Amino acid sequence: MASADKKTDGLLSPDRRKALETTLRGIAGVGVAGALIATYERSAEAMPTQAIRPPGALPDERAFLSACVRCGLCVRACPWNTLKLADLGDHVATGTPYFVARKVPCEMCEDIPCVKACPTGALDHALVDINKAKMGTAVLVDEENCLNFLGLRCDVCYRDCPVIDKALTLEMESNPRTHKHAIFRPTVHAKDCTGCGKCEKSCVLEEAAIKVLPLRVARGELGHHYRLGWEEYQKNQGPLIKDIIDLPDRAPNDVTPPSGVPDAPPIIDPTKLGKGWKP
Amino acid sequence: MTAASPAPRLNREARLAAQEKLPERSFLARHKFLFLRRLSQAAVFALFLTGPLFGLKIAEGTIASSMTLKALPLTDPLMLLQMLVASHWPEGLAILGAAIVAIFYALVSGRAYCAWVCPINPVTDLAFWLREKLGFQAKGWQPKPETRFWVLAMTLVVSGVTGTIAWELVNPITHAFRVVVFGATASLTFVVAVFLFDLFVARRGWCSHLCPVGAFYGLLGSGALVKVSTHARVACDHCMDCYAVCPEPHVISPALEGAKKGFSPIITSSDCTTCGRCIDVCDRGVFRFTHRFDASETTTVPAVRSNCSGETP
């Protein structure tokens, strides 16, 4: 530097200046590299929706990436070759395990070998009952193409569901197209769905009408302060607020009385309403 | 580099012929530890590949964490450290595995990991070899060897800040492993990048200057037992062959040139990868493997060239 020969003591001495410069250059370079890795990490957290983590995977992706050492022991333990380690370009954090249900779904082994093989707990060893797994949840994403919705009795997803009649039921309703046939509507109950993906794999369509999605995509979440009045009423065996004044229901004669729950909205029989009424 | 020695590798034969008529050591003897290392590196892969290839499961997983014969868990301790910094408390298996690995390298030789196990070592060695073959003169960009410790600190900081095992996003070691053991071909990108970096950008750039894993194992092995000793340093004729071949040449001088200053003949720096190439290439039998407390040395110049095992004739 130009000033190096002017003063030779203190911070400006050539040796100290050089040492300082070298150190600063090192820190700056490494710092930039660190910032790049951190940015890369942020993008690695975003996964494509068809990439499903193995059973017991820590639900928060960041928590999972803090625990998974990308060793592939779960992949090796899987007897069905369901799991695969992400390669570069898979848009899943490289080296982490995932599966694509439409290719090979999870067969829900009772002894969950993948979880047992995980050395770090990225797959939570607290999961001992595979039926409690929450890899994701099935969603019937396309009612317009689902054969059952078209009035046929395909039912393949329902028949293939390992948690049949709990996670996936057929709900009968009238077919509004013909007014005389039934529609057996495949209905997912997320509480019991493990996200194994057998339904998506078995869907006979070119592109599955029922798909397993990660919970973060598939599920809504109530406000944490929300209370469902009817559930609270049941739990409490009565209203939560004691001595509430139950005013007499003032309703027209053609409205049926309330259902026993105080202040529940009246059940309106639409046939008894006047002609101009719209819901 | 200290002593002026124009292109020492090229005139070895001539030099030998001029200096003394000694029996030529065989090619095998001059590459003994190199072959042993390549064998060791290949064996690591082989243990993981017998399962997928022949159905004979020996080691499963990768170098990040593995299970050998369903009995021996091994986990990379740096991986565990990043995990802890990212505030995940692992299962006992990972802790046990990391403890076994850490104790092994702390006792034996920290950077033996780099020279004898790491799959990137043959890659950067190949880049170095090619660089010499092609006669690249410029060392290229040479960051301070200490930079790797900054990189190590950075990986831990980024792991802490992002709450993830940050280095694994780019770690060429585990990428290379997944290429071979799991067929993750696209992961070859990072391996090729390191090769090209070492070939065109920086001589011995990755392993000797930047890699935080090597830095970590170096720190881990700062009290390790296995060391290289310049026990016959009196015989040194300053041909510079050892400096030319050593991936961390700065570790040699204090021992080799330190007799007058009263320094021990033991190469003490934890940067030394205990690769043994110096033992291989030294025609004077100056170097040998020994333990850190063996400061014994030969005081008489050997009449004939020692063999490669480092035993004083």
Image (spheres, coloured by chain):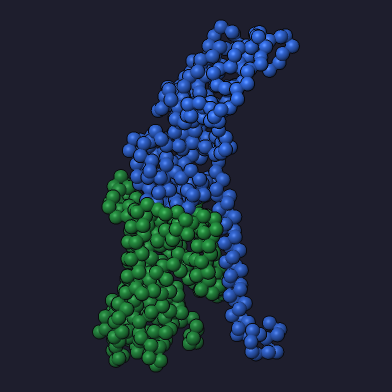
Residue A2 in which image quadrant: bottom right
Frontmost residue, B212 versus B36 = B212
Name the residue furthest left: B313
Q: Residue at x 52, y 49 (%)?
A: A62
Where residue A98 appears, as percent x and y from the top left, is 46, 42
Between B31 and A238, the one lying in front of the other is A238
Q: Is residue A161 above or below residue B190?
A: above
Determine whether, in the image, residue B47 is placed left or right of residue A173: left
Residue ID at (63%, 18%):
A248
Look at the image and tell me in which quarter the C terminus of chain A lies.
top right
Q: Which sits in the foreground, B156 or A205?
A: B156
Residue situated furthest top in the rendering: A180
Question: x and y percent of residue A105 in the render?
Answer: 44, 34
Image x and y of residue B15, in percent? 41, 85
Q: Is residue B234 above or below residue A54?
A: below
- In this image, A257 relative to B296: left or right? right
Residue name at image x 47 percent, y 41 percent: A53
Q: Which chain is blue?
A: A
Quadrant location of residue A129? top left
Q: Is residue B133 visible?
A: no
- One can see residue A277 in this view: yes
Location of residue A12 in the rendering, given as x and y in whole percent from the top left corner:
66, 85
Q: Is residue A145 above or below residue B165?
A: above
Residue A210 appears left or right of A253: left
Above or below, B82 against B11 in this view is above
Question: Which chain corresponds to the colour green?
Answer: B
Comparing A99 with B14, the one in front is A99
